[in-house]
Amino acid sequence: MAGEDPLISGAAGRYASALFELALEEKALDVVKADLEKFDALVADSADLNRLVRSPAFSSEEQGKALSAILAKGGIKGLAANFLNVITQNRRLFLVREMIRAFKALVARHRGEVSAEVTVAEKLSDTNYDALKSALKSVTGGKDIDFNVKVDPAIIGGLIVKVGSRMVDTSLRTKLNSIKLAMKEAR
């Protein structure tokens, strides 16, 4: 299964596939997915945790000690905690966000959902989130949408939506770059 999709390939795909198979076997897909999303949010919200996860300067022992405290504080346990501990011991913690993304894609495929990656300049309100979800649901033929929303202030405004191989970029940054390019060509 890991080789079927470019999103689910390489080391991250292999680890995600193994976790998916184990979670499916133990009937714990929802719990594992929720715990991994919680951990992913912690990494995204903390520059220090992101540095700990990505930096090769920390030993696996140092990462393991810090991870134990973070998992306990975040209430992440069971299969997800064991998985995070294993990838830390195997020196693969730097791939954890890719693994989580691949795991979520496998869960979505298993459930017949469509995965969508949405990049916004600022956090979406509940109303805008619901409106975007229903718009994407109508575009995908009524399939359920599994959202991965990323906040990137660099896009200035608008949003970037990726659903499968399709991408719609309505970011203000892209529009400004297009205008800039058109002005250079007009000279």
Image (cartoon, rainbow, N blue to C red):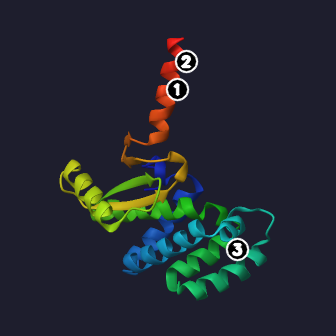
Residue located 52% across and 78% down the image: 80
Residue 55 in which image quadrant: bottom right
User: Mark 1 touching mark 2, by CB under 8 A?
Assistant: yes
Q: Sequence-wise, which precedes: disc 3 or disc 2?
A: 3
What residue does disc 1 label? 180
In the rendered view, would you say 149 is above or below 19? above
Could you say whether the residue bearing mark 1 is in a helix, strand or loop? helix
Is residue 92 visible in the rendered image? The answer is no
Could you say whether the residue bearing mark 3 is in a helix, strand or loop? helix
Could you say whether the residue bearing mark 2 is in a helix, strand or loop? helix
**Residue nearest the viewer, comparing 10 with 96:** 96
What residue does disc 3 label? 89
Q: Sequence-wise, which precedes: disc 3 or disc 1?
A: 3
153 on left or right of 157:
right
Position of residue 161 measured from the top left corner of the image (x, y, whole percent): 38, 48
Q: Amino acid at mark 3?
A: Gln
Query: Local crowd at mark 3 within 10 Å, few (<14), some, or many (≥20)?
Result: some
User: Mark 3 touching mark 1, by CB under 8 A?
Assistant: no
Is residue 144 visible in the rendered image? The answer is yes
